[in-house]
Amino acid sequence: MATPIGNLGDLSPRALEALRGADAVLCEDTRLTGALLARHGVSAPLLPLHDHNEDDQTPRVLARLRGGQRLSLVSDAGTPLVSDPGYRLVRAAIAAGLAVGAVPGPNAAVMALTLSGLPPQPFLFLGFLPPRGGPRAAALAGVRAAERAGLSATLVFYEAPHRLAEALSALAEAFGGERPAAVARELTKRFEEVRRGGLAELAAHYGTEAARGEVVVVVGPAPEEATGEAELDARLREAMAAGLSVRDAAAAVAEATGLPRRQVYARALEAGRARGGGG
């Protein structure tokens, strides 16, 4: 079930009822969840469930469920499974034919999307970017390739505050500094902030102003890219001048532009016939 992402008043009556009726509550950090339950007078036992013990805990949890116990799963904040533990347990419970329900509520990704001013649908939630530069650049290159192939969606990322400026710079390099974006942090808390602007502008700001708290980065969809025949022909000529065959040149240009390989190959053959006829 979803728990508050900042403001403790966001715990829904239905979630509170489920917590009070649980035989035990599975949680990432017993200290954080314990404080939340104490605030609402709930005294259910707490069972740790996090990335490091989920595989070991799952058989034990399933045994308790088979025995008729009611268990509630929460994360430290927001909706479980969304960049939080629980997916392996839920999948195992479903496979075992056990009943699984959900209590909706706070979610930082959806709230940031709502406040960003960027197109709300479709959107693609990508969780946390890899923390190191090389893997992060590779992950963003994969997203950019998908955009060239036709993906048009607002992108939503989670990020650690101490990596925010570096991540924004990587996003600007991958998607272009003018790409519209928003940084939302401390959502529902006293110092909630949503800053909107181009990726380069946001990277410059947070390069000098350290961010604090939980951070969500929302990036607007890619602008439409039209590759005209003249540009396509120029790319094909450049590839073949480098020694590639017509087929290999078409494959390379198709990958670079995101155009269908069959379309690019047909254009390469047509351009080759035109050059041959004029010679």
Image: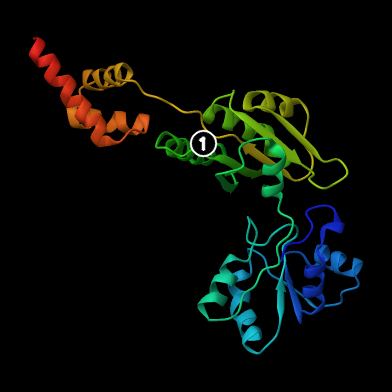
Q: Tell me if residue 112 comes above or below residue 15 in the rendering.
A: above
Kindly identify the residue that appears in the image at 76 percent across and 25 percent down: 208
Asked which quadrant contains residue 150, the reply is top left
Q: Position of residue 232 (x, y in %)?
A: 30, 21
Q: Where is residue 259 in the image (x, y as percent from the top left)?
A: 33, 33
Q: Where is residue 175 in the image (x, y as percent from the top left)?
A: 53, 29
Q: Tell me if residue 278 comes above or below residue 181 in the rendering.
A: above
- Among all residues in the image, which is located at the extreme top? 279
- Observer-nearest of 24 and 102: 102
Q: Where is residue 257 in the image (x, y as percent from the top left)?
A: 36, 29
Position of residue 1 in the picture relative to residue 242 (left or right): right
Asked which quadrant contains residue 115, the reply is top right
Kindly identify the residue that appears in the image at 87 percent across and 58 percent down: 9
- Observer-nearest of 199 and 60: 199
Question: On the rendered image, what quadrant is the C terminus found in?
Answer: top left
Query: How many numbered tags mark residues here?
Result: 1
Q: Tell me if residue 13 comes above or below residue 124 in the rendering.
A: below
Badge 1 crowding class, 10 Å Cα cut-off, few under 14, some 14 to 19, many 20 or more, is some
Kindly identify the residue that appears in the image at 68 percent across and 69 percent down: 49
Question: On the rendered image, what quadrant is the N terminus found in?
Answer: bottom right
Kindly identify the residue that appears in the image at 43 percent across and 26 percent down: 225
Position of residue 55 in the picture relative to residue 190 (left or right): left
- Among all residues in the image, which is located at the extreme bottom? 67
The residue tagged 1 is: 137
Look at the image and tell me whether residue 31 can be seen. Answer: yes
Q: Which amino acid does label 1 sit on?
A: Ala
Q: Tell me if residue 92 comes above or below residue 137 in the rendering.
A: below
Look at the image and tell me whether residue 245 can be seen. Answer: no
Q: Is mark 1 on a helix, strand or loop?
A: helix
Position of residue 70 in the picture relative to residue 275 (left or right): right
Asked which quadrant contains residue 148, the reply is top left
